[in-house]
Amino acid sequence: MKYFDELSRSMEFLARDPRTMFLGQAVACAGTAMTNTLKNVDRAKLLEMPVTEDLQMGMSTGLALTGVVPVSIYPRWNFLLCAVSQIVSHLDKLPAMSNGGYQPKVIIRTGIGSERPLHPQFQHVGDFTDAFRLMCKNIEVIRLDEPEHIFPAYQKALERTDGKSTIIVEYGDYYSEK
């Protein structure tokens, strides 16, 4: 099993659920390696977003409150940083602020930017997994180190019943290396 193939299989699995919707940059239009993992996803489930990371996460939280399971895609951690307020102060805190009345489920897909064969510079290769684990009490952060971890992580994120959202972290270099 290959890393990229497992990502594609996982996206196809998520897309079969009538509740899911994929949104983000380079989701419906080419632009990142993540785009290619969505080739077999029904185009009607893809919502291309402008470069408005904070707005995207606010929309994802709102959609989740209506019963949609957003798969909110941020190609790199460094882009996701622009949505920290929405993640840490809203999505993560809604269950506590509502005494468990609101438990939005958002699947946040992000990645550690690839450094090979071309290093894109340091503003694109950050890994903030540990920091987000410290900041978020109601969001699980899963880093995908091996291909065999991929499908179970996405399956867990979709099927979980514990009221938590999930941030799933991919390695850009592994798309072609593992």
Image (tube, rainbow, N blue to C red):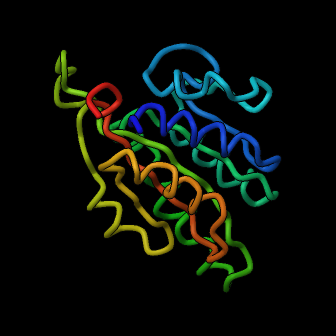
In-front residue for pair 17/112: 17
Which of 154 and 70 lies nearest the eye of the viewer?
A: 154
Please name the residue shown 64% across and 35% down the image: 23
The image quarter containing residue 113 is top left
Where residue 130 sits, quadrant-wise, is: bottom left
As rendered, which of 86 and 134 lies closer to the eye? 134
Horizontal side of residue 152 vs 71, given as left or right: left
Residue 4 placement: quadrant: top left
Give the answer, above or below, for where 153 lies relative to 21: below
Residue 70 to residue 51: above or below: below
51, 5: nearer the viewer: 5
Residue 177: x %, y % from top left: 26, 29
Please name the residue shown 34% across and 66% down the image. 133
Q: Tell how many labels.
A: 0
Whole-percent x, y for residue 126 in the image: 24, 41
Query: 42 above or below 138?
Result: above
Which quadrant holds the N terminus? Answer: top left
